[in-house]
Amino acid sequence: MQVADQRAVAGAPFTLTWQLVGADGEPVDPGTVLVTVRGSDGTAVVTGQATTGTGTGPRQYVLTAAQTRQIDVLSVDWTVGGDVYASRLVDVVGRLWFTNAELRAAETAMAAAVNFTPAAISTAREQVEAKIEQWCGQAFVPRFAVETFAATSGPLLASVPTVRRVRWAEFLADDGTVLSTLTPAECAAVPGSDNTTITRSGGWSTGARVRVGYEHGQNVPPPGLKAAAMRLCREVLAKGKGGGLPENAISYSSSELGWSAVLVTPGVRGAHTTIPEVNEQIDANTFSVPGIA
């Protein structure tokens, strides 16, 4: 599955942004820029619309709440003079793990908006969410994925658990030609799953491969994991600030020679982060693939 460049929330307006840069990494004026947006199934959302922005500034286009109403992965093409200069992906998720207000209330060190801006929080939150989902092997908010599988008479095995529903599916020949697609009714007949299986009556044996777009993930993160995510977000935002006993100390002692501590080190003894409480929540919420006897 490809990594998205931007993240939007379903049902909320969202600003697409693209910045052309030169070989030196500095902004360049691309002139007039048009944007085209498509859903994961190829459905047009925006077709060749002009963007805002002039000179060396970034080009932007605002998607409406209606255009982001569904969880999906949107493809975005930025076109100049008839040529596609850049193609990007936007991950439209069901919700955020936590709001800015929730973070500021839970982690009072983040209360000063002048020091921790909404943009900074957004970046840190995405980093934390992505890391925790990677460690736990599952999504804790509704997400969308597109995967291609080998044709089989049995169930498909997705990369992530908690398959909520199949939105579309197409059967492919060896050369990638689409042989047939499932109707909305046929997609609706595919049941959800708490694990990684996508099971269909009659199997998925048409053609050589099958490409499936499906929703997955929990409705909301568990309270303890949500608190851990906010704590880790604070760590990302305030790294290098503060003092006193390191928060990754699990024990310490002092003597006339000074003090010493046993510290948690990421990557050592299974620790994911430097914070023991965060590691406990990650371990408690890690998805394990059931064994097959």
Image: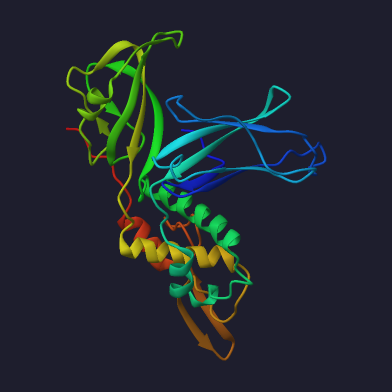
Q: Is residue 279 left or right of residue 19?
A: left
Position above or below: 215 against 240: above
Q: Does residue 212 appear to the left or right of 47 in the view shown?
A: left
* Identity of the residue drawn at 22% across and 27% down: 199
User: In the rendered view, how is the structure colored?
Assistant: rainbow
Query: Nearest the camera: 269 or 121?
Result: 121
The mark tally for this picture is 0
x then y, percent, for residue 180: 33, 12
Q: Residue at x 29, y 11 (%)?
A: 206
Q: Is residue 1 above or below residue 5?
A: above
Q: State whether residue 264 appears in this view.
A: no
Q: Position of residue 76 (x, y in %)?
A: 57, 33
For residue 234, say whether it is visible.
yes
In which quarter of the view is residue 53 placed?
Answer: top right
Q: Could you tell me residue 237's position as x and y percent?
A: 58, 65
State which quadrant residue 224 falls in. Answer: bottom left
Residue drawn at x 55%, y 44% as measured from the top left = 6
Q: Nearer the viewer, residue 88 or 68?
A: 68
Q: Is residue 194 above or below residue 153?
A: below
Query: Residue extending furthest right?
Result: 24
